[in-house]
Amino acid sequence: MRAPRIRCVASAAILAGLSACQGTEPSYGVANILRVDGAQWMSGRISGKAGTAPVEVTATTSAKSRVYAGEEAVVLTGLVGPQDETGPLATAVAIGIDQEDSYWILPAPERDSANAFLMRFQASLSFSPALDPTLFSIDDQTGAPKVTVNLRAITQGQMGEIRPFDYGLLTQGAPEGDLVVSLTWNAPVDLDIHVVAPLPDGSDNIEVWAKNPSALPPDGQPGAPETAEERAAGGTLDLDSNANCQIDNRDMENVVWTGPAPSGRYIARVDASSLCGLKSATWHMTALLRGQLIQDTWGTITAAEASLPHRAGSGMTAFVFDVQ
């Protein structure tokens, strides 16, 4: 992971009463679990003091709902402003997690086009590859760990109350499901899993891969799911890891049927979209059906194979299996 760009915030009012830029070393924040690109690192726990300013984070929106250790450039946007129109304008937002004794301050430099009392911010979050899932609480709905990012509006060096934003935490282990086909590899390369699977109605087959991440027909076509539950249960690719050699350190892709996998024949393949300058990589493909390992295959893929076309039907066959 690249080192974050750390700079002093230009407005002295943002840091007044909190800290000054002088004495803040560039290395501060490099070892943090959570990093905020272009923000000022601050010592102290983000929830360590009660809110004293009449400002608040009024809205937050993220490009993602789930993150994983090592993921970078997760965009989180929001609005900060006074609790009412007679209060002071907010000028920045503090961003941090309770698992660390430091946090980040990011300016909110633009007025919202719909409300002149609100200021807009955009944060680019990065999560350390050393992130330990056991440090975080479990989401009651998903049963998986969640990372709670805390945000506090700032004005004249004082903070408002905390507004939390939760991200589900993806782990390196294969997810649970009725059928899980997993591909892992051992190098910073861009490999792709391909799984040819029967449609739920048995009328045809469909190929799941990065360009077609669902094993269900799109809306309006025969066999398309009618409910959100049916769509969620269908085979789905969870991630296009290391896409275009943008290394994310996950090195794993899974196609998961959370509901009953359709009966029929399945074909699992591995394709080298790019070896990202390397000569070869070792891969490992498995299939678990109702919790039982039914396929387990290793192999090596080379630069010569990476030079072939990358589309539906591409890649080398790892194994074929039937679901009854």
Image (cartoon, grey):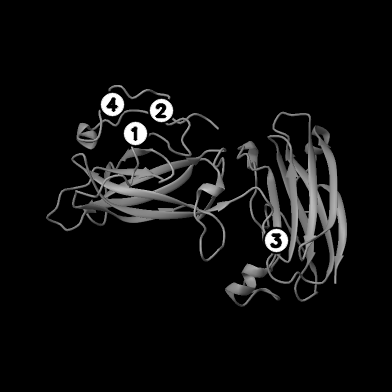
Residue labelled with disc 2: 28
In this rendering, which labeled residue sits more in front, label 4 or label 1? 1
Q: Amino acid at mark 4?
A: Cys
Residue type of the residue flagged with mark 3:
Val
Considering only vertical position in the picture, is 302 above or below 155? above
Q: Is residue 118 shown to the viewer in this render?
A: no
Mark earlier in primary sequence (3, 2): 2
Tag shown at residue 43: 1
Nearer the observer, disc 3 or disc 2?
Answer: 2
The crowd level at tag 4 (other Cα within 10 Å; few <14, some 14-19, many 20+) is some
The residue indicated by pointer 3 is 256
Q: Amino acid at mark 2?
A: Tyr
98 and 95: which one is in front? 98
Q: Which residue is mark 4?
A: 21
User: Where is residue 121 drawn, in percent x and y?
Assistant: 33, 45
Residue 297, which numbered label?
Answer: none
Mark 3 or mark 1: which is in front?
A: 1
The crowd level at tag 1 (other Cα within 10 Å; few <14, some 14-19, many 20+) is: some
